[in-house]
Amino acid sequence: MEREKLITLDHVSKHFHVGKGQTLVAVNDISLDIYKGETLGVVGESGCGKSTLGRVVMGIYEATKGTITFEGKKLDLRRAKDKMEYARKAQIVFQDPYASLNPRMLVGSIIAEGMEIHNMYDREKRQERVYELLETVGLNREHANRFPHEFSGGQRQRIGIARALAVEPEFIVCDEPISALDVSIQSQIINLLKDLQKDHGFTYMFIAHDLNIVKYISDRIAVMYLGNLVELADSEEIYAHTLHPYSQALLASVPIPDPDREAGKETVVLKGDVPSPINPKPGCPFAGRCPHVMEKCRTQSPQLKEVRPNHFAACHLEME
Amino acid sequence: MEKVLEIKDLRVSFDTYAGEVQAVRGVDLTVNKGEVVAIVGESGCGKSVTAQTVMKLNPMPPARIKTGSIDLCGRDIVAASEKEMQDIRGELVSMIFQDPMTCMNPTMRVGRQLTETLIKKKKIEKKDAEAEAVRLLKLVQIPNAEERAKQYPHEYSGGMRQRAMIAMALACGPHLLIADEPTTALDVTVQAQIMELLVKIKEETQTAIILITHDLGVVANLADRVAVMYAGKIVEKGSARDIFYNTQHPYTKALLKSLPTVDTKKDEKLVSIPGTPPDLFAPPKGCGFASRCESCMKICKEYQPPTFEVGESHEASCWRLHPDFPGEKGDVK
C-alpha cells in the first residue's frame, strides 16, 4: 500500500550559535517522511535534539539547512502568508502544562485565541466550538470560565490539547505530553490522543523518552542520538530486530515492571555520558560509547541506509 | 533480621493558611538491614513526606508529627532534638535527592563538599579526609577520581552528579540510605548505571535503602519489598513478587495495568484510573481510593478499611479482603 506523504524533511539541520564562535548542532542532516494519519514516535535521551526537531518541523525554528515539504509544497516560512497557513495546519502540545498556558487568560479565551487569529468562524460559533472542544477532551463547558491554575496537571494537558485542536490542524507535534504527569493520569491522556486520532485522522509526531509508551502509540519510531537520526523503522520491527547499537542499549536500559523478567534480562549498561553537541567531532556520534566501535567509526560518519525493508539504520556495522 | 527502621502509626500534617493538610495518615513500615524497600505512589501521596520525617527535614512548624513513633537503630526520632538530629543525619541515615544540581553547593569543589562532612563528623585530619573523599568517589565509580574531586559540580554531567551525591550520602557510613526519586531526572541509559550502582552499594555495605519512586520498572529492578501509598496511607505492602504477581489492592492493580509494556498491543486500550487523587485538606471518611475504584462498595465510602493479612508479610487495606466479603460475583455496587 502506497502511503501518502504529509511532510518530507530533506537534509534538515538546525544549528545554534552559542558564542565564542562555537556552534551547537542540535539537529544534524535529518531526512525523513511523515505519512498521513500515522504516528511517528521520536525517542532519544535529553539533549539529543528530539524537541528541536519537533520545533523545526512546526516552523517555530527555521532550519539552518535543508527543506521541509508539506503536502507536496515546499515551505517558505519567511513568507508571512505561508507561515500563517502552516501554523494553522500544524499544532503542538507542550510538555509542561503548567508553563504552556497563560495564567492570566480564561480557559475559554486560551482555546479560542487560535481561531481568532486565523479568522475562523464568527464570535458565537467560536464560543460554541470552545464548548464542543472542552467536551471532546473530557472536560465540561463550565470550565471555559476558569483560569488554568484551577486545574490539575492532567486537566491542563487536556486544555493544551483542546487549544491545539481548535484550529482544525492536520498535524500535531506532541512534545513529551505526558512526562510531567502522574502514572495514573498518563494513560488517560494517551487514550485521549489515540481516540482523537481515530476520530479525526490526525498525523502525530510523538516525542518522548519513555520507550514503552512510544512503542504503544507509534506506527514508526525514529531513534535520535546527539542530533542524528540513527534508526528508523516500524515500531514492531524496531523492537524485534534492533539494529543500531545505541537503540539496543536504549531498549535494554528500560526497566520492566516485572521482577522476574527484570532479574533475567541481560543488561547492556552503557559506559559514560552523552558527549557535548557543541562542535561535534567527525565520525559516528555514538563512537565514544559504542561497544562495537571500529577504526572507521571515528573518522567517517555513517549514512542512514535501508538495511531491511523499511528499516533504516546509520551504522557501519551491518555492512561488514 | 536486624531492624534498622521501624515506623508505627505515623501521622504528619502541615498547618497552612488554608487549613490542615493531612499528608501522612497512619503509616507503619519496617526496614531491615541490607534490604531495599520501595515506596511507590503518585505525587502528593505522602511518600516523600514519610521519608523526610525520618530525617526530620520538614520544618516544624508548619509540619507537625501528630502521632506515631519512629525508631531508627534504637534512637527515638520523634523525641530527638534538632541537636541530636544533626548527629543522626549522616551517621545513621542520609538521603539522596532527585535533582543533584540543586542539592550540591555550586561554589564549592566536589572534593571539598565531601571532606567538609568527613572532618566535621569523623573528626579526622584534612589529609586523611581528602584521601577518603577520593576513595568514596572511586566507590561510586567516578573515573579519574583524583582529578574530579578538584572540579565543581557544574563540570559534572547529570549522572556523575548523582554519583557524587551518593558518595556524600555514604561518607559517614549510614545504616539507612533514603533515595528520593534518584533516577527520575536522568536518562534511561544513565538510570541503568545508577541502579546498578545502588545494587552494588547495598551488597557491599549492607546499607538498607528506602527507594521512593513512581516508576514501577525501577521498583521491579531494585526492590526487595514494596509499599504502595495512596492519599497518605500505605494501601498494600509486601515483597516485590507479592506486589507484582499477587496484587491485592485495586489501586495497585490499576497502577500496574495503566502502563503500557513492551508487550501491550496497539489496539488494546490502556486501563486508566478515572478522576484525580483526593484532596488531603479534607480526606475522605472512608477508603481514600473509593471515588476512583471500579469495585467500590457502600462500606468503602463510610469506613476506612483495616489492614488485612493476605500472606506472609503481605498485607493490603481493602474491604474486599474482609473474610465476610461474599466474593467477586456478589458485588454490591
Image (cartoon, coloured by chain):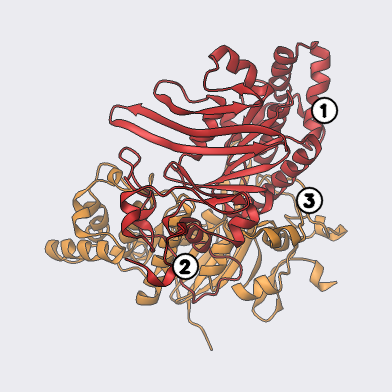
Task: Between residue B265 and residue B110, name the one nearer to us.
Answer: B265
Q: Colour of chain A?
A: orange
Amino acid type, mark 3: Gly
Residue A94 in percent (x, y) is at 42, 53
How many C-alpha atoms fall within 10 Å of the one at disc 2: few (<14), some, or many (≥20)?
some
User: Between marks 3 and 2, how big is the CA–CA gap?
Assistant: 39 Å
* Tags 2 and 1 touching, CB below 8 Å: no
Residue on which the image places disc 2: B270
Name of the residue lying farthest toward the right: A295
Residue A103 in percent (x, y) is at 29, 42
Residue on which the image places disc 3: A288
Amino acid type, mark 2: Leu
The chain coloured red carries which letter? Answer: B
Residues at discs 3 and 1 both on one chain: no
Tell me the element at label 2: loop
Residue on which the image places disc 1: B135
Q: Decide: is B70 above or below A166.
A: above
Res A130 quadrant in image? bottom left
Would you say residue B200 is visible in this rendering? yes
* Tags 3 and 1 touching, CB below 8 Å: no
User: Between marks 3 and 1, how big is the CA–CA gap?
Assistant: 26 Å
